[in-house]
Amino acid sequence: MRRRQRLTPEDKRIIKLHGGERHIERYSFLERLAHFAHLLSLFILLFTGFKIYLGWDFMSYHLALYIHMIFAIVFILANWLLIPYNIATTEVPHCEKCKSGEHNEFVHSAMNIAGRYLLGPQDIKNMYHIMLNFIGKGDYPAFTVYDVKNKGYIGKLHPATKFLLVFEGMAVAVIVFTGIVIYNLQWSLLGIIPVSQILLAIGDIVAPLFNMGTIAFMRALHLAMAYFFIIEVIVHVGIIEMDPKVWKYHKAIFIGGEEDLCDHNYIKLINVEAEPGE
């Protein structure tokens, strides 16, 4: 049950302009599913991976390896199928110029999506003000931008999350490719593309630069990426836990997927000018 909130005249005008809707979908079901699958598989991979690496005795090696491989597949599907699909199909604000043909709809949508997920100048400014806020000098900036009239997000990711996205994407690729080699030195895709052999050839070039053998280098990279994800989770979760007002986004990504237009904490609303005759 939602907490009752007294609406101001400004809130009522925003709701009216938005077609009478107050609660908007911040995360779709597939976005929430991808986030949950990524997080669950990551924790299980770390848990079983360290069991395999350190030899913890709470389960057998073979069971840990079996679970590790199952959730490696879940991890790959979440990161290389669901998440790219969600990004590519992200809803963007309604645009009359796209509808009339003045804008190229595909290019306009692609630019909107890129601005939503890639770090930009405004995100860097927001990170600066967030750091000032942590030491008590200034307000926490709004990092969610929503177009009320055209019903769509301009931006909704925390700037620190956007900063980490590129590194996380690289870490996913590295941990998957090194994991393939560690799992099977002869693994090939569909029996046609010798993936392990290609990766080993690359490793034979790079590993000597670190005075390491190829397999040892692959294992070290795999372990390093595991530690990266531990740090990344701490930073990602810490962004929310450092400020109780941001917990609403935790609730949105794990439970309902909705955001309240009248909860103005960290949300900037644009295109809220009064309609003619108001």
Image (cartoon, rainbow, N blue to C red):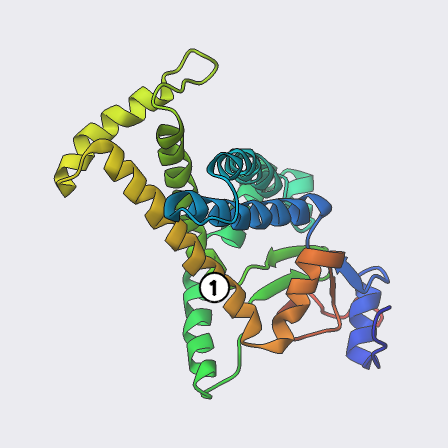
Snapshot quadrant of residue 157: bottom right
Give the camera-side residue of 78 and 107: 78
Q: Residue furthest top?
A: 192
Snapshot quadrant of residue 176: top left
Q: What amino acid is found at the position of numbered circle 1 in the picture?
A: Ile
x, y (%) of residue 53? 38, 45
Q: Which quarter of the rendered picture does the N terminus lie within?
A: bottom right
**Is residue 237 toward the left or the right of residue 21 in the image?**
left
The structure residue drawn at horizontal position 28% and vertical position 44%, both measured from the top left corner, is: 220
Snapshot quadrant of residue 98: top right
* Residue 276 seen in render: no
Residue at the spot of label 1: 234
The structure residue drawn at horizontal position 44% and vertical position 70%, both measured from the top left corner, is: 127
Figure check: 262 above or below 68: below
The structure residue drawn at horizontal position 72% and vertical position 55%, both measured from the top left corner, is: 151
Disc 1 is placed on an element classified as helix
**Is residue 255 toward the left or the right of residue 104 in the image?**
right
x, y (%) of residue 125? 42, 70
x, y (%) of residue 111? 52, 46
Q: Which quarter of the rendered picture does the C terminus lie within?
A: bottom right
x, y (%) of residue 222? 35, 42
Tell me if mark 1 has few (under 14), some (14-19) or many (20+) residues whose alpha carbon lies within 10 angstroms of its own. few
Figure check: 148 above or below 264: above
Give the camera-side residue of 95 and 200: 200
